[in-house]
Each structure stands twice: as C-alpha cells, then as structure tokens.
Image (cartoon, rainbow, N blue to C red):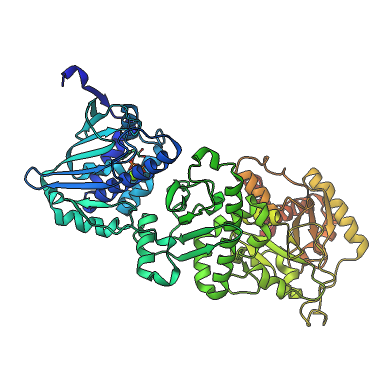
Amino acid sequence: MAAADIETKHFQAETRKVLDIVINSLYTERDIFVRELVSNAADALEKFRHYSLVEQVEFDTHVPLEITIDCDDKNHTLTISDTGIGMSKEELETNLGTIAHSGSSQFLQELAEAAKKDVNLIGQFGVGFYSVFMAAKKVRVQSRPASGEEGHEWASDGGGTYTISPCPGLHRGTKIIIDLKEDAHNYAVKFTIERIIQQYSTFIPFPVKVEGKTVNTVQAIWARSKNEITDEEYNEFYKFIGNAVDEPLYRFHFTADAPLAIQALLYVPKENFEVLGMGRMQPGVNLYCQKVLIDQHSENILPEWLRFLKGVVDSEDLPLNISRQSLQDNALVLKLRRVLTKRIIKFFNEEADKDATKYQEFWRTFGIFIKEAITSDFEHREDLGKLLRFESSAGEAGEMVSLDAYVNRMVEGQDSIYYINGPSRSAVENGPYVEMFKKKGVEIIYTLEPIDDFVLSHLGAYRDKKLVSADRADLDLSKTTGKQEDTVATPQEEALATDSLEQLCAWMKEVLGERVQAVKASTRLVDSPAMIVNVDGFMSSSMERLLKASGQGEGFGMGGKKDMEINASSPLIKKLATLRESDTDFAAELAWQIYDNARIQAGLDIDPMEMVQRNYRILERAAGR
Ligand code: ADP
Ligand code: MG
C-alpha cells in the first residue's frame, strides 16, 4: 500500500486519558479485555441481525453470524473476528478515537475512581474497547460495514496516535488483530481463551469458535420454562447481562400470553451505581422480539425510574423489523411498558410481604428510584405509594414502616397521615413539632431525607388519607383521640390569661414585622415556647430548604408565608408578657431570639452574626451586670 494512503491521527484528549487509566491501573485483571472484545463482537452481530431485517442486504449474505477466535502461540497474536455490522472509515474514527461521554472531566474522574475500586466496574463506562491495550503492544482493527462499502484498517499502539488506511478484500464485519505484550503472551494460548469465554461469555447468543471449535452453548434463557432453569444458570445470566461480578438482590422471571405475549427476565443488582458516583445510569434492559435484539439498553420498554434493572424483555407481538426510532411512540411498546411496570411494582410488593428485611435492603439501596417514580409516574402513583418506607414515631431508630402499616394503626378521629422532616431522628424527636403527637399518642412519620416532603406532597394522599406535614399552620389534632392518659389531664402549668396572651401576640407581631404573617397562641405546643408553621399548604419548611439548595429559593427570611405559634403555658412566654411592660427593649431582644430559635428548629436559615451578637447581649444580662 502506498504510504500516502496511511493517515495518522491523534486521539481525542479525553480518550488518551482513558487509555492511560486503563493501561496503568487495570493490569491486574487483564482477562476482562477478552470479555469486552467478545461482547463488542456480539453487539455487532445483534446489530447486523436487526439491520438485515430492516434493510435489504445484498452483500456477503451467505456469511454466517458468528465470532471466530484464533490463537497464534508462535507469533504471540490473538485475533477476534465477527461477521457483524462492521464499521466504515468514519465509524472507526469516532468509535475508536473518541469516547461518547467526551468532554466530561467528571466522567474521567469517576472512571479513575471506579478503576481503583473495582476493575469490573469499567465495563459500565462504555470504554470497553480500550481495555485491549492492557495486553496489546499493537492493535489492528480491520472492518468492513454491512453496506458493502470498502473496508479500512485502524491501527494503534495505544500511545497518542492511530493510523487509518484502506484495506480492500475484507468480508463483512470486524477483525481485531492483537500483538500481545511480552508479559501477556498467555492470551495466545487456546486453553486460556477457552477458559475466559466459558467464564464470561457463555450466554453470547452466537457461536463463539476458538480454533474452529464452538465453545459456548447458544441459548435464550428467558424463553425457557422456569422450572428447567437452575439458580446457577440464572445467576450466570445475570453476570453476563448485567456486566456484574456478584449475585443479584432480586430476580423476576415473568411470562404472559394475554393481553400481550411477554417473556421478561429482570434482575435487581446489589449496588446502586448512581450513588457510587458513576453518574446517571443507562437503562439496563434489552428489548428482544423472538430472541432477536431490537433495542439494547432500551429507553422505551420501561419507565426511566426503572433504569436500575438489568435483564431482557422479549415480546413476539412486536414487528421484527421495527426501527429503533419508531419504538418511541409505538402504541404496542407503550402498552408493553404499562403492563410490565404494573407487574414489576406488584413484584416488589410481594417481595416486601415475603421478606421484609430483604425488602429493607432493597429500599435502602433503590428507594431513591421509587421516590423519583412518585414524582414522575402519575399513572402508578398509588401502587408506588405502597412501596414507600420511612421511620416513624411508632418504630425504633432504623426501623422502617410502610404507609399501609401507618394507616392500619391510625387512631380514632384521625383522618390524615402526618409527617415531619428533619436532618436526623433525634433532631425531629426533640423538636417542637412532635410534642402534641407524642402527648396524644398519634403516630408521625419522620422523613429524614430532604427530598421526602417533595415526594409526599406529590403523592398528596394515600388510601384516601391526606398526607400532611406537621409544620402546617392549619394542622388540627383536636378530634383525634389517641392515648388514654391524654384525657387524664397532666397537671398543666397555668396558662397565660387570654387577654394578656392576645396582647403579647399582637406586640410580638409588631416587633417581628414582616418576618411573620401572624403570631398566634398554639394549641399544639407542650414544652417548647414557640414554633414556626407554614401557612401555604404546599410549602413545608423542608420544601423551602430543598428549593433553596437547588438555587430556586429566595434569600433568608423570605420563602413561603409563615406564622409563629407561641405556647401560653411556657414559663418563658409568661415571663415575656410581664417583661414587655417593664422593659420593652429587652423583651424585644428576647422575642427576636425566640423567633430565631424557632427558625432553627424548623431547619430554616437565620442571620447567624446578628443572632450571636444578640445572644451575647442577653447572656451579659443573665450573668448580671
Ligand atoms: P461500548 O461497547 O460500550 O459502546 P466500546 O469501547 O466497547 O464501548 O466500543 C466502542 C464502540 O466501537 C462501540 O459502541 C461500537 O460502535 C464500536 N465497536 C467496537 N467493536 C466493534 C465491532 N467488533 N464491530 C462493530 N463495531 C464495534
Ligand atoms: Mg463494548
């Protein structure tokens, strides 16, 4: 070939970094490069199979769909060929010269972290091809696309550059020729390759031939009947489809004939990769029709919030030649998705009933997706509400209760489900909002994540019981009768007389000005002198924190309308009523301090500098001048 035909190109900067990470930090688990290349070959074959259903193929039609591996132990080369979709010159450059997640330095950082933690995580990042450089001195990729357009060779030693040149006379598909590094010569040994294929790639749905002999059994496990499949086979398939090394938390094999023909084999992993800092997950379920892959990592077959599932959905009702684009608004796909979603939610509920402890493990790891679902999947909202778990005043720390358990325990006269948000269980339990609940023996849910109130206000109600945040101004517990001893009056502090109470409220409102909408006498405080309550039903204090954290809230002291409730039986409030007359200025300082304290207990922000200065003035006085 004329030297002029060979073009030398530079890898995209990000790609070079990926290469560095892959080559330098992953060499301990080199076997995975074989798995990555074989899985790319299988992907290419699946793509071709689908392509041949959608397009008229005229070239190389006789070539069988398979993966061929040749080991040359003398020259220390390993060659992996497939008869799949192949790549054009442009595709060689974009697919092997750049990375899809390009430009994101965060991505690279996460990759480096993951590589340090567990080499197997690398497959999740879609940088599989580059793993070849763990073992390769030099790699040549010869490829000819299924369209029949002439082939090209891409070659690189994993340094800064690669070359591209014409390569005539190829069959359809891709051949990867690997010159092995000195210390990786064992990958040209037939036995080694056979072992790796058997370990990682037994479920490849095409024959994998090593030195002419097929080494895998081709099967679509999801299409077989449940009682013929062993746990081991199920787990092996999970490892294959989920790119996983451990066993799944849950497995769900589901078949139906009506209203649609569905075969689904789905798994819940043990880990949530999104919280492991790997960014947003790609959907993990592939869509098949009669065992032909239609849509890998399908965005359409399940709602987005189920992206943590791994597995396969096969429906023979789908037209085989459907294109990926038309899946999006295909009525049948929408119907499939609805049926599956319902079934999956039901499955989780059944599992929760069967083994509550295991379900809690699921909830801790994937509860965040259920919460996401409630805010995004209106259709299944009520069913999803069943899956929620929270701590509550009826349980021990760390114990989770369901809304069903809560509703079943509701006391006489109670018509709502109550919840209160706080940064920790002890913060909530020591705060003013639960005082009357404790006294009356009414259960209250503790929502300890910032997102929880947003989720519950989206849910709105459960089993026709309204979900109500306990920091609402219009909360009324007077009709609920919980604990018996509640009616046997505990010796109460004598409360402030009504008219001085009213005057005190009016005066405090005057002092605090626009910062509160009103100051009112509380019917629910037991010990605390005061608390902040929200006048707008939708805007709980925790919602306000959430909005503020996301940059949508306004500055401090703004936000939703608030009242302050004061406790007429509190010694401090009673003293304040007297002090107001004898020393108005100092009483005003106390009023402000009470207000700030109540804001802190509500988790709302205050002006800390102003508060500290005032607090010192008060302390000075308390210490005696
Ligand atoms: P991923 O498989 O996650 O997309 P890889 O780094 O393994 O990432 O591969 C990058 C891309 O290169 C693939 O998406 C595919 O488009 C292309 N590719 C790799 N191997 C082959 C092959 N054998 N045949 C056709 N295309 C391939
Ligand atoms: Mg790959």
Residue 38 position (above or below residue 392): above
Q: State the residue at coordinates (90%, 60%).
A: 500
Residue 585 position (above or below residue 386): above
Q: State the residue at coordinates (83%, 54%).
A: 519
- Residue 347 or 606: which is nearer the viewer? 347
299 sits left or right of 607 in the view: left
Dividing the picture into quadrants, the one containing residue 427 is: bottom right
Q: State the residue at coordinates (85%, 72%).
A: 494
Residue 620 visible here: no
- Residue 16 or 284: which is nearer the viewer? 284
- Residue 463 or 588: which is nearer the viewer? 463
Locate the C terminus and report the quarter of the image it occupies: bottom right
Dividing the picture into quadrants, the one containing residue 466 is: bottom right
376 sits left or right of 211 in the view: right
Q: Quadrant of ligand 2?
A: top left
368 sits left or right of 502 in the view: left
Residue 245 percent coordinates (x, y): 34, 60
Residue 266 percent coordinates (x, y): 47, 60
Residue 399 position (above or below residue 578): below
Q: Hey, which residue is sitting farthest right in the picture?
A: 499
Residue 275 percent coordinates (x, y): 46, 53
Dividing the picture into quadrants, the one containing residue 11 is: top left
- Residue 501 or 420: which is nearer the viewer? 420
Locate the N terminus and report the quarter of the image it occupies: top left
Q: Hey, which residue is sitting farthest left in the picture?
A: 74
Residue 431 percent coordinates (x, y): 67, 64
Residue 455 position (above or below residue 390): above
Residue 441 visible here: yes
